[in-house]
Amino acid sequence: MPSATSSGSTTRTKPKQYICYLCSKTFDNIDVLNSHKRLDHGSTETGESTKPQPPAGVA
């Protein structure tokens, strides 16, 4: 009877090296992280936000 386990091949997952400091999502490629920051957070490569920010003291 066949075993219920995998077919013997093991997959090693490399820990993700790059973390978005804005939302803590992790990425294994710096280019993907930069795209994520630009698209999801409106950040430029210099870290500046292109999305409008609320006035100080307003959450």
Image (cartoon, rainbow, N blue to C red):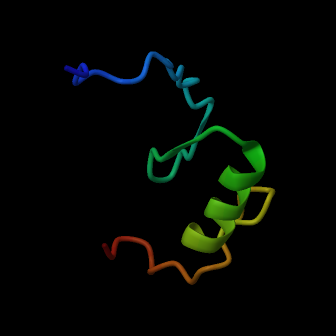
Which residue is painted at 45% across and 80% down in the image? 55
What residue is at 55 percent from the left and 70 percent from the top? 40
Say if 11 sits above or below 25 in the image: above
Q: Position of residue 3 (x, y in %)?
A: 24, 19
3 lies left or right of 13: left
Residue in the foreground of this view, choosing between 56 and 6? 6
Q: Position of residue 4 (x, y in %)?
A: 22, 24
- In this view, 24 is above or below 8: below
Q: Where does the C terminus fall, quadrant-wise?
A: bottom left
> In the displayed image of the protein, which residue is found farthest to the front?
1
Image-quadrant location for residue 43? bottom right
- Report the residue at 25% width, 22% height from top: 2
Q: In percent of the image, x 45 and y 16: which residue is there?
A: 8
Relative placement, left or right, of 48 versus 22 is: right
Residue 20 vs 55, above or below: the answer is above
Q: Position of residue 30 (x, y in %)?
A: 74, 44
Towards the viewer: 31 or 50? 31
Give whichever of 40, 15 is nearer the camera.
15
Horizontal placement of 4 versus 40: left or right?
left
- In this rendered view, identify the residue nearer to me: 54 or 46: 46
Where is 5 relative to 41, above or below? above
Q: Position of residue 10 (x, y in %)?
A: 49, 18
